[in-house]
Image (cartoon, rainbow, N blue to C red):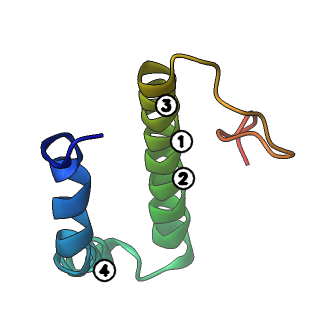
């Protein structure tokens, strides 16, 4: 892909440290006990699931072929 089409990804790489710090500060007040930690974990997993769906769609759009299958699914199929 041309550099201009990769810009969103390269800019995110440089912002990851700041994003992580912002997220940790935002989550910390809710993760003080086991119930809060469970909710934070579930929210993080749901976010990763959604990102996986988005990236799978991006793969299909860019390569115009199905996403390769691996031993483990890219999204959770159960409530784990």
From mark 4 to mark 2, how far is it between C-alphas? 17 Å
Between discs 2 and 3, the one toward the N terminus? 2
How far is disc 3 from disc 4 in space, using C-alphas? 34 Å
Q: CA distance from mark 1 to mark 2?
A: 6 Å
Mark 1 surroundings: few (<14), some (14-19) or many (≥20) residues within 10 A? some
Q: Tell me the residue that label 2 is attached to.
A: 45
Q: Secondary structure at mark 4?
A: helix
The image position of residue 19, as x and y in percent, is 21, 71
Mark 1 in CB contact with mark 2 (< 8 angstroms): yes
Q: Against 57, is 16 above or below?
A: below
Q: CA distance from mark 2 to mark 3?
A: 21 Å
Q: Give the numbered dot on residue 28.
A: 4
Disc assigned to residue 59: 3
Quarter in which the N terminus is drawn? top left
Q: Residue at x 73, y 49 (%)?
A: 80
Would you say 33 lies left or right of 23 here? right
Eyeballing the image, is 60 above or below 41?
Answer: above
Identify the residue at image location x=71%, y=33%: 68
Q: Can you give x and y, in whole percent of width and height, for residue 69 in the image?
A: 77, 34
Q: Quadrant of residue 27?
A: bottom left
Q: Are marks 4 and 2 in contact (CB under 8 Å)?
A: no
What is the CA distance from the residue labelled 1 to the residue labelled 4?
A: 22 Å
Mark positioned earlier in the residue sequence (4 or 2): 4
Q: Are marks 1 and 4 in contact (CB under 8 Å)?
A: no
Q: Tell me the SS state at disc 1.
A: helix
The structure residue drawn at horizontal position 75% and vertical position 39%, both measured from the top left corner, is 73
Helix, strand, or loop for circle 3? helix
């Amino acid at each position: 892909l041309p550099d201009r089409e990769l810009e969103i990804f390269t800019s995110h790489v440089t912002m990851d440290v700041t994003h992580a710090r912002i997220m940790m500060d935002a989550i910390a007040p809710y993760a003080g006990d086991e119930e809060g930690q469970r909710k934070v974990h579930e929210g993080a997993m749901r976010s990763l699931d959604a990102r996986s769906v988005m990236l799978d769609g991006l793969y299909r759009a860019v390569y115009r072929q199905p996403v390769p299958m691996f031993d483990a699914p890219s999204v959770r199929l159960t409530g784990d």
